[in-house]
Image (tube, rainbow, N blue to C red):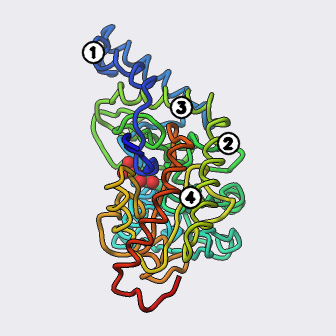
Amino acid sequence: MTKKIYLDYAATTPVDPRVIKAMLPYLSKKFGNTMSLHSFGQEAKEALEESREVIADLMKAKPNEIIFTSSATESNNLALKGIAFANRDRGRHIIISPIEHPCIIESAKWLETQGFEITKLKVDKYGLIDPDDIKKAIKKDTILVSIMHANNEIGTIEPIEEIGRICRERGVYFHTDAAQSFGKIPIDVNKMNIDLMTVSSHKMYGPKGAAALFIREGTKIEPLIHGGGHESGLRSSTVNVAAIVGLAEACKICKKEMGKEGRCLTRLSNKLIKGVLGKISGSHLNGHPKKRLPNNANFWFKGVEGESIVIQLDLLGIAASTGSACSSEKLEPSHVLLAIGLKPEQAHGSLRLSLGRWTTEKEINYVLKVLPEVIKKLRKISPFKESFKF
Ligand SMILES: Cc1ncc(COP(=O)(O)O)c(C=O)c1O
């Protein structure tokens, strides 16, 4: 294979050419500031409000419930800290899962230094939260539960609807980080009882620098960024119209193609999973076999290091990852893999292959051809080769 194979769509996606086309006018002629009164400003404002409608539509929300931000990290920070500070007279207890993205975990840690109490629940071997644990953990002073929709490393999809129902019955705000799932699987914020939800453009074939936070009407929340009062006073700063138009176009495409694309990706990732587990002894699937994102495959291989696999695959033209894009530069084992019960040495032997819109069967066949060779070669040179047999 001479063409490079990109299997790291969970880290970021290329921008869909249709998205680029929709954005271009807003990078050139339609460059206005949405706060300006003249026609340039009004043209930009119109595009912003149309985009808000499109994004709201994909999650069955109202347009006035969408706040644009620069990233999922920012949306998650706003959700946690904004709810915490606006509701601290009601209580100071927040519940999260141990497999959240670092931007939730670190925000929660910081909130602890500000006098909030954080409960980190446990997950099972697949990374699933037991809704009963949420019931048990909610106290009188609980103000927020934040559980991600789908995990970025292992792809496990959480029982969000049930968790939302429990929170709603107890009058506790429910936030979900849907950075990995929005645009890939259907989401209805009303049916799923979601009060706040994070979505990200660059995980769904839109540009970087645009994201959104759904905030249910009537939710008490404080801004983190103060200034000119943009985005209903919740996120001041001149709006990145071109990127937001791109996010909206990405949503339109996902709405039209999600079903077909999801079925295709499920077929390809199932083929990949079945092939890897069948061809490579000492290989294991991380995450739930069924309740997983259509594009995610995550494995651990006995006796090899994930980083070495990624380097060897890169030499063969395949871009993969050991875990999340943020943690793959660190040498500590992934907190997600440790939370699902892997030992540090097992977590170190992990590989994430995340498929996307342009993944082909031919590419999957190529991976299935070369990966067993890579693992065999790495095991041969492993200093621990005497301690395991294959
Ligand atoms: C589930 C999840 N949440 C949040 C983020 C943070 O996104 P960003 O780095 O674009 O702010 C990511 C990125 O990998 C993610 O996968």
How far apart marks 2 and 3 lie (CA) works out to: 18 Å
Going by the image, does 106 lie left or right of 251? left
Residue 277 percent across, percent down from the top left? 60, 67
- For the N terminus, give its image quadrant: top left
- Which of disc 3 and disc 2 is earlier in sequence? 3
Q: In the rendered picture of this protein, how many numbered marks are placed on residues?
A: 4
The mark found on residue 155 in the picture is: 4
Looking at the rendered structure, the secondary structure element under dot 1 is loop
- Which of disc 2 and disc 1 is earlier in sequence? 1
- Answer yes or no: is residue 93 visible: no
The mark found on residue 322 in the picture is: none
Looking at the rendered structure, the secondary structure element under dot 2 is helix
2 vs 4, front mark = 2
Q: Which residue is mark 1?
A: 28
Identity of the residue drawn at 32% across and 15% down: 41
Above or below: residue 374 compared with residue 303 = above
Q: Which residue is mark 3?
A: 251
- Which of disc 4 and disc 2 is earlier in sequence? 4
* Residue type pointed to by label 2: Arg
2 vs 3, front mark = 2
Above or below: residue 376 compared with residue 144 = below
- Which of disc 1 and disc 3 is earlier in sequence? 1
Residue 80 percent across, percent down from the top left? 45, 58
Q: Residues within 10 Å of mark 1 (few under 14, many from 20)?
A: few
* Residue type pointed to by label 4: Gly
